[in-house]
Image (spheres, rainbow, N blue to C red):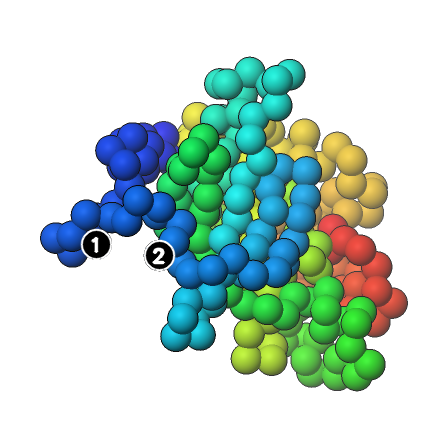
């Protein structure tokens, strides 16, 4: 299913981009998202810019790094495909959707709604600390997203406060699925739960492993996860003591 979706996207790309209504797409597909503004995030594999239209509307445009000389073409396309496939496969109100994906001049781009505030900004660069009820609200949403992803056989593997956006104060959007993996063999994946858990602290393995069990009836429920002592203590450290990862 995922490969088929990416294949359709690549066919559109090879035909020169999408059509808007009955009109041909502009010479630069990127131009329809306006002028490039500031850099919003940068990493080893991509940079995210804010693009703005003349009417003031903004988009988050992720520009993937070009293939390095040391990377095989197949491996490069596989890494891009993995992120796009998983992002389009998941459909949850708290997961950031991809609005567009295209290739231009040998560079791949994905377009998302623009949300300026991350949980990192809110907890580490704001003088006002989160109230307990706000922390609990955000935490419940994070767990809800994780339960949904694990039900779909997907592990995020890079869930940190930089990758959680905040809209309308306390409503989250999870982003960045570049490191995500499908861990269920039924989906044709080779990644196993044991590999995901390998580098976690011993105390974490039981609860996280319980959330990743293939059979939904055997999995730790959302209510159990929310009341787990390790999960709650880590959540409070993350929100109050400004640690880096939501592990």
- x, y percent for residue 179: 61, 39
Q: Are marks 1 and 2 in contact (CB under 8 Å)?
A: yes
**Res 44 label:** none
Q: Residues within 10 Å of mark 1 (few under 14, many from 20)?
A: few
Q: Is residue 87 visible?
A: yes
Q: At numbered mark 1, what does the secondary structure look like: helix, strand or loop? A: loop
Q: Nearer the viewer, residue 69 or 198?
A: 69
> Residue at the location (80% across, 69% down)?
124
Left or right of 196, for residue 183: left
Q: Residue at x 50, y 53 (%)?
A: 61
Nearest to viewer (mark 1 / mark 2): 2
In space, the residues marked 1 and 2 are separated at their CA atoms by 10 Å
Q: Where 238 sits versus 28, above or below?
A: below
Residue 88 visible: no
Does residue 130 appear left or right of residue 143 in this picture? right
Q: Earlier in the sequence, mark 1 or mark 2?
A: 1
Q: Look at mark 1 in the image and give the residue it sits on.
A: 20
Residue 241 percent coordinates (x, y): 87, 67
Residue occupying the point 83% across, 71% down:
240
Tell me the residue that label 2 is attached to: 32
Q: Left or right: 138 with respect to 215?
A: right
Asked if residue 73 is positioned above or below residue 184 in the image, the reply reads above
Q: Quadrant of residue 126?
A: bottom right
Residue in the picture at 78% in, 41% down:
200
Residue situated in front as seen by the camera: 55 or 124: 55
Q: Nearer the viewer, residue 229 or 195?
A: 195
Count residues near mark 2 (Cα–Cα under 10 Å), then give few for <14, some for 14-19, many for 20+.
Answer: few
Q: Quadrant of residue 116?
A: bottom right
The residue tagged with tag 2: helix, strand or loop?
A: helix
Residue 64: x and y in percent read: 54, 39
In the current view of this chain or complex, which residue is farthest to the left?
A: 22
Q: In this picture, is 137 found above or below 238?
A: below
């Amino acid at each position: 299913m995922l490969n088929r979706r990416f294949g359709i996207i690549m066919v559109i790309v090879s035909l020169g981009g999408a059509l808007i209504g009955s009109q041909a797409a502009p010479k630069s597909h990127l131009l329809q998202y306006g002028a490039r503004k500031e850099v919003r995030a940068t990493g080893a594999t991509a940079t995210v810019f804010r693009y703005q239209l003349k009417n003031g509307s903004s988009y988050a445009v992720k520009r993937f790094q070009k293939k390095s000389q040391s990377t095989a073409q197949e491996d490069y396309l596989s890494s891009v495909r993995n992120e796009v496939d998983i992002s389009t496969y998941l459909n949850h109100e708290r997961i950031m959707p991809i609005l567009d994906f295209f290739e231009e001049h040998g560079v791949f781009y994905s377009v998302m709604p623009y949300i300026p505030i991350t949980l990192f900004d809110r907890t580490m660069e704001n003088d006002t600390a989160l109230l307990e009820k706000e922390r609990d609200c955000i935490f419940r949403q994070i767990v809800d997203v994780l339960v949904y992803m694990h039900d779909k056989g997907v592990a995020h593997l890079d869930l940190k406060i930089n990758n959680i956006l905040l809209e309308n104060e306390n409503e989250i959007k999870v982003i960045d699925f570049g490191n995500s993996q499908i861990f269920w063999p039924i989906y044709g994946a080779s990644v196993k739960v044991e590999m995901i858990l390998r580098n976690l602290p011993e105390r974490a393995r039981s609860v996280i492993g319980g959330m990743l069990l293939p059979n939904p009836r055997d999995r730790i429920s959302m209510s159990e996860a929310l009341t787990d002592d390790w999960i709650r203590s880590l959540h409070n450290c993350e929100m109050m003591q400004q640690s880096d990862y939501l592990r």
